Image (spheres, rainbow, N blue to C red):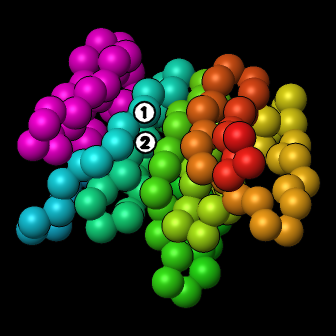
Amino acid sequence: HTVSLTSGGRLLAWGYDADGQCSKVPALAAGERFTEVSAGLYHTVALTSTGRLLAWGNNSEARCSGQPALAAGECFVGVSAGSLHTAALTSKGRLLAWGADNCGQCSGRPVLTRDEHFTSVSAGNCHTMALTSCG
């Protein structure tokens, strides 16, 4: 399936929809809009203007429902859907990942230096890549 956002924050999705990854887009609160979206193999993930992360479609391996708890005052600022997992960045520079971990795509995060934090994330088939504040 394919997903995209309009300039006004409307989410569009089309293609294979057996698990609702295109048709079951969650409703937003008044004034809230989508700011980022990513398509996995059979699931879709998106961020909203309030920092909420929404996920829908096939939930095997908890790729939609397995979001870790955030610390007080922390919100999501980046998200990427892999084939069977989801990876996200938080406002505190943390990288979180959940879902299938058969290749270490969720648990294999590198150790950062004390002053380093994650700035960008991209999830693939069986891997997750991220940039840090040190490049």
Q: Is residue 69 left or right of residue 17?
A: right
x and y, in percent, of residue 59 in the image: 54, 41
Any mark on residue 38, and which? Answer: 1
Report the residue at 54% width, 34% height from top: 81
x and y, in percent, of residue 35 in the image: 28, 48
Report the residue at 37% width, 52% height from top: 47
Q: What amino acid is labelled 1 in the image?
A: Ser
Residues rendered magenta in the picture: 1-25
- CA distance separating discs 1 and 2: 5 Å
Could you tell me which quadrant the N terminus lies in?
top left
Q: Nearer the viewer, residue 113 or 81?
A: 113
Q: Secondary structure at mark 1?
A: strand
Q: Is residue 83 left or right of residue 132?
A: left
Could you tell me which quadrant the C terminus lies in?
top right
Magenta highlight on residue 45: no
9 versus 112 height, above or below: above
Q: Secondary structure at mark 2?
A: strand
Question: Mark 1–mark 2 contact, CB under 8 Å?
Answer: yes
User: Which residue, as the protein is rendered here, is positioned at the far top?
Assistant: 15
Residue named by callout 2 = 45
Can residue 63 be seen? no
57 versus 34 height, above or below: above
Q: Is residue 56 left or right of residue 62?
A: left
Q: Residues within 10 Å of mark 2 (few under 14, many from 20)?
A: many
Q: Nearer the viewer, residue 40 or 9?
A: 9
Q: What amino acid is labelled 2 in the image?
A: Val
Residue 28 in which image quadrant: bottom left
x and y, in percent, of residue 38 in the image: 42, 33
Can residue 35 be seen? yes
Magenta highlight on residue 4: yes
